[in-house]
Image: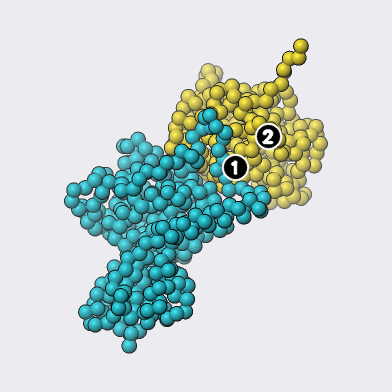
Chain colours: A yellow, B cyan
Amino acid sequence: MAVQTFKLPKSLKEGAKFSFCPGCDHGVAVRILAEVLDELGLTENTITATSIGCSVTIYDFINVDAIEAPHGRALAEATGIKRARPDKCVFTYQGDGDFASIGIGESLHCALRGENITAICINNTTYGMTGGQLGPTTLLGQKTTTSPTGRNVEYYGYPIKIAEHIALCDGTAYSARVSLDTVANIKKAKQAIKKAFEIQMKGLGFTFIEILSTCPTNWKMTPEQAHDRVRNQMMEVFKPGVYKDITAEKTV
Amino acid sequence: MECLQKTKKKVLMKGNYAIANAAVMAGCECYFGYPITPQSEIGEFMSGKMQELKRAYVSAESELAAINMVIGACSTGAKAMTSSSSCAVSLMQEAISYASADELPIVLVSVMRGGPGLGNIYPSQGDYNQAVIGGGNGDYQTIVLAPSTVQECVDLTYKAFYLAHKYKNPTILLADGLLGQMMEPVEFTEYPYPEIDNSSWALSGAKGRNGRIIRSYAPLAENQCVFLNKLYGKYKQIEENETEWEEIDTEDADIVLISFGSPSRNVKSAMKICRKEGLKVGFLRPITLWPFPSKRIAELSKKVKMFLDIEVNMGQMLKDVKLAVNGAVPVEFFNRPVGNPPEVDDIVNKIREIMK
């Protein structure tokens, strides 16, 4: 007898085909996010503010109400949504450039106000959709189309450690960095996203997940090489972990 | 500052407070703002009042954030607003373009001060272009209402919420520092317009239906063509239904004075003085700067000898007047670049001079 072992999450649109490049982690991130919305029964009560870049396409895949924010303004629009309709589950899905460069003001202040919103930030160390330029999380030494000899401090300064910065905000209830490079880490990432949504729905404050992701096209790597890079280079600087969780038992 | 409900008699009130009070009376559910002179009293009033009424208020980190919060709130169908001035409204242009494309009922109160750049905090009409033409990208049009008295600040604030929601279109109340800061007797009626049903488009969670997307991203040119034609069909409707102006003594007029906002009051006084002198002077004040009363001005241009356009800027509405007149008769211009309106005597002298 055939046993169904694989089912698409109900929160994904029927027949939706991901438009991401082969080996890109966006697809995995969207998939586990959809699973979390299913498991928490939030799909019909959720509004998302999308961003600019590859992450904007999330509204083509997830079957929730959505508004497309200008570049960097997703958390301002999410704030407007949540303040107008506090009973809704509100999240943003942004890239590192959207969240931590053009939108860093909106991001930090949303965390400082302790808005009951969940922000998911895909950190792939580059501007993907525009063809791989240097972004706020581009690693030192990393070659991009606008750092042709590699990121050096003299011209470009340093990459930002987003999850650590957000954890410093008093309004933040949860801040974690996860990756999608192994099955075990995908499971951890899903748990972190789930935790963030649970905390949001309890009204405990701002919740944030930074997801280390691949961009094989712009990194000019195979998917396998790209995941090796996440492990060997990105995790050296952007260490995975939970940086703040106000619901955790205090350990000294 | 106490919030006044429906008033039985007139009360003395500052323009900025009157606008804020009217917004509360109009059912504004969310206010998001960032301080800037000469409109800061609006945010000050709202901060206390909205909390007292358990409505939404955020001291936003910037004007960029403030207006995008308005977009977020409006996407759920809520009545939401921000207020700002000149150089700070410049920062909002991107969001106004987005809200136009998203067809969202955002309400922006713009209390003009001197410019360009930081300029100064004197009254000005230097943002006619900013409001009417706009500085955002793409083809779009905002509805622009221009009050000339504190009472009209109240009445047009009500109307701004109504028109914004009726047409799902960004709507700007364009006041100036003079109106914002001066006190006049006003009365508040109840919100005189019907509530608009937003349920067919507002984001409320995809319960029993597919997710709704409010977006402006249109990857295919042909889709964008369809959308823009539809959008401009809506603008045509607004032009047909909502163009509003005040007109006095144009029947026998040789010259028609055109002026908007607070300076139009001095212009009206000048007109009355000239009439007493036997000069055949008429007066036309656009109340909606967009839609602009072009048709009416074109009609008048067939029977009057000339127009005199008076503004507190370097001649911004002047271009719209000239477009409407289309060369039929001369259009003269009298201005003060920035600050208080031209004195009545100066306007009278200008009228005498050009009517010689």
The answer, for residue B161, to whether it is visible in the render is yes
Which residue: 28% across, 80% down? Answer: B280
Q: Chain of mark 1?
A: A
Alpha carbon separation for disc pair 1 and 2: 19 Å
At mark 1, the secondary structure is: loop
Query: From the viewer's perspective, is B283 left or right of B140?
Result: left
The answer, for residue B313, to whether it is visible in the render is no
Which residue: 35% across, 45% down? Answer: B194
In the rendered structure, are the residues bearing label 1 and label 2 in contact, judged by CB atoms less than 8 Å apart?
Answer: no
Q: Amino acid at mark 2?
A: Ala
Q: Badge 1: how crowded within 10 Å, few (<14), some, or many (20+)?
A: many
Query: From the viewer's perspective, is B261 left or right of B238?
Result: left
Q: Which residue is mark 1?
A: A51
If you read the primary sequence from the N terminus, does the residue marked by circle 1 or circle 2 appear first?
A: 2
Q: Which residue is mark 2?
A: A16
Q: Chain of mark 2?
A: A
Compare residues B226 and A173 and report the one nearer the observer.
B226
Q: Quadrant of the C terminus of chain B?
A: bottom left
At mark 2, the secondary structure is: loop
Which residue: 41% across, 63% down? Answer: B289
Q: Position of residue A118 (x, y in %)?
A: 54, 32
Q: Position of residue A71 (x, y in %)?
A: 58, 47
Which residue: 66% across, 37% down? Answer: A123
Quarter occupied by residue A61? top right
